[in-house]
């Protein structure tokens, strides 16, 4: 009875989502081929200006914008709007552009326009600060870039969605109507909830098959699956493990499973969790394998570090699950369960820790299982869910789970700089390490691949030794599509989805 009630509620939520957002299968009436995509996460930002914060991820996913280089499935940069890149010196690069690229307004992409776009991004986005003060020289289809400091990952970082190339002079409203080069243009959007795209009639790289694409946020996982099953949407992103099993068992749908570089990162707030013994007990008290294989049914692969095990980036001596060690560490630090309630105390104060989560993918399910596991250690975990990740910036948390792509540009540097560096924009736990900072400084100017691997692994080990943060597991993206839908990508990098080949029979 309860299961039937849940399915009816899910159907109601799905129908309500489409009624409110004006989506659904109504497009068939006008004879146009519109592909409807749904997901439980935000599908747009408050702005669709790719240079602002993380908005570029949505602009790229929706097929609106493109970058000079893009990542392949092995996370290696490949030419996209550019033809090639040459490293002339530690500070000098020469990028040859493709000569047939035009923007959605019909204007040709030139080296001057690319320079203007990158300069604007550098001024707006803190993550692109490495481009500030760079000198640009345009010569036909060749753009020379001289950075202020040596920057080994320039080509990688030009894959970042913030580096989407816009026609700056041709854009009147960057927030609502960015003029880019993708197969679709933005017709309208409602912040976080929906986006409507129409075919770019000036697309430079061949025919665009669909007339349009819509993205709709359907927060409830069951409602998302029901929307796919009822035909309200053609593709469902980030299906839950349970719903993915149902979709996979049906001959009406195709299920695509993609291991991602997106990891469930556990932040330790150094302003609050000041006792290393407590931080170590938390790290030793979580059985990641059980969470991934049994609790999430393969929707997550246990992690021992920040980067996929298929990469050469791994810490030499990671911590592993050890319940007895976790209990012993707390006992040695003066924590005892004096009243027999299962929670240890010190100086009469129970060990109660808040675990804040951003409701994304499986974060809430992971937090629930961690809560149960850490109670066996003697730690009471109180889970605090949030709809947005902004709570991290305020520092109002003890522990925090955040699902983050650790190789967004195919190289670890950007993630480590932002999450581990003392002044990193994503160092929400206020971790400070002179050793890690020094290694990061070296990493930024090191071009030799073997030396870069050594430095990355050294930084990872330092983070583990300081009990600064942990990495629970890597997300497996599970995408369900109606039979006949093609051209929708699911990739390890997470932000390539809509292509010119998106189609349905």
Image: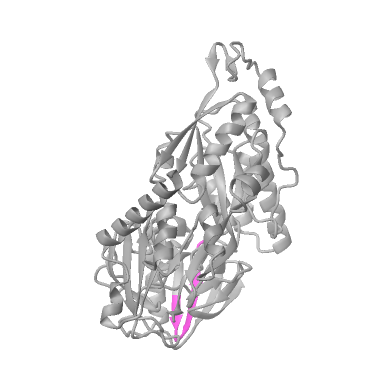
Q: Is residue 215 above or below residue 209?
A: above
On screen, residue 120 versus residue 260, left or right, reads: left
Q: Nearer the viewer, residue 13 or 167?
A: 13
Q: How is the image coloured?
A: one colour
Q: Position of residue 377 (x, y in %)?
A: 64, 26
Task: Report the residue that reaches farthest toward the right.
Answer: 316
Q: Nearer the viewer, residue 250 or 345?
A: 250
- Number of numbered markers: 0
Q: Main secondary structure of the magenta part?
A: strand
- Quadrant, the C terminus: bottom left
- The residue segment tinted magenta is 137-148
Residue at 53 percent across and 53 percent down: it is 242
Q: Position of residue 262 (x, y in %)?
A: 56, 55
- Quadrant, the N terminus: top left
Q: Position of residue 382 (x, y in %)?
A: 48, 30
Look at the image and say whether residue 486 sits in the magenta stretch: no
Image quadrant assignment for residue 62: bottom left
Q: Position of residue 147 (x, y in %)?
A: 51, 65
Q: Nearer the viewer, residue 405 or 366?
A: 366
Task: Report the residue that reaches farthest toward the front.
Answer: 1
Q: Nearer the viewer, residue 156 or 232?
A: 232
On screen, residue 284 versus residue 370, left or right, reads: right
Is residue 62 visible to us here?
Answer: yes
Is residue 47 visible to us here?
Answer: no
Image quadrant assignment for residue 30: bottom left
Residue at 55 percent across and 53 percent down: it is 415
Residue at 69 percent across and 44 percent down: it is 461
Residue at 70 percent across and 63 percent down: it is 449
């Amino acid at each position: 009875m309860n299961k039937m009630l849940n399915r009816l509620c899910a159907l109601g939520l799905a129908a309500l989502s489409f009624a409110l957002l004006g989506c659904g299968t109504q497009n068939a009436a006008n004879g146009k081929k519109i592909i409807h995509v749904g997901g439980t996460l935000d599908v747009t930002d408050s702005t669709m200006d790719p240079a602002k914060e993380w908005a570029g991820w949505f602009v790229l996913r929706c097929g609106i914008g493109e970058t000079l280089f893009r990542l392949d499935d092995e996370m290696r940069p490949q030419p996209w709007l550019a033809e090639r890149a040459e490293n002339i010196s530690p500070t000098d690069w020469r990028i040859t552009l493709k000569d047939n690229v035009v923007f959605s307004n019909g204007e040709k992409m030139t080296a001057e326009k690319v320079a203007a776009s990158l300069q604007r991004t550098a001024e707006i986005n803190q993550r692109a600060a490495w481009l500030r003060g760079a000198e640009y020289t345009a010569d036909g289809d060749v753009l020379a870039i001289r950075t202020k400091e040596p920057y080994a990952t320039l080509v990688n970082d030009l894959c970042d969605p913030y580096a989407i190339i816009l026609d700056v002079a041709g854009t009147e409203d960057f927030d609502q109507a960015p003029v880019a080069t993708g197969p679709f243009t933005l017709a309208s959007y409602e912040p976080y909830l929906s986006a409507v795209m129409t075919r770019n009639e000036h697309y430079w790289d061949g025919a665009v098959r669909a007339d349009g694409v819509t993205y709709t946020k359907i927060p409830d996982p069951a409602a998302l699956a029901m929307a796919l099953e009822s035909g309200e949407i053609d593709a469902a992103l980030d299906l839950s493990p349970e719903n993915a099993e149902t979709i996979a068992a049906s001959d009406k749908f195709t299920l695509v499973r993609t291991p991602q570089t997106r990891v469930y990162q556990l932040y330790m707030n150094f302003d609050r969790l000041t006792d290393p013994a407590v931080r170590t007990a938390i790290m030793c008290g979580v059985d990641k394998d059980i969470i991934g294989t049994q609790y999430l049914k393969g929707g997550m692969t246990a992690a021992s570090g920040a980067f996929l095990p298929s990469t050469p980036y791994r810490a030499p001596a990671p911590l592993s699950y050890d319940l007895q060690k976790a209990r012993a560490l707390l006992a040695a630090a003066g924590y005892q369960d004096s009243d027999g309630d299962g929670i240890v105390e010190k100086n009469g104060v129970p060990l109660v820790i808040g675990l804040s989560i951003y409701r994304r993918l499986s974060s809430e399910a992971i937090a629930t299982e961690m809560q149960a596991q850490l109670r066996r250690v003697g730690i009471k975990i109180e889970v605090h869910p949030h709809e947005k990740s902004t709570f991290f910036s305020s520092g109002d948390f003890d522990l925090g789970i955040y699902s983050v792509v650790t190789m967004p540009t195919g190289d670890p540097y950007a993630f480590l700089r932002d999450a581990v560096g003392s002044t990193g924009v994503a160092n929400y736990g206020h971790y400070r390490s002179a050793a890690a900072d020094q290694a990061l400084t070296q990493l930024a100017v090191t071009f030799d691949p073997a030396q870069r691997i050594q430095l990355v692994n050294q930084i990872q080990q330092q983070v583990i030794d300081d009990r600064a943060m942990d990495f629970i597991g890597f997300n497996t993206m599970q995408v369900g599509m109606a039979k006949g839908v093609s051209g929708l990508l699911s990739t390890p990098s997470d932000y390539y989805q809509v292509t010119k080949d998106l189609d349905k029979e």
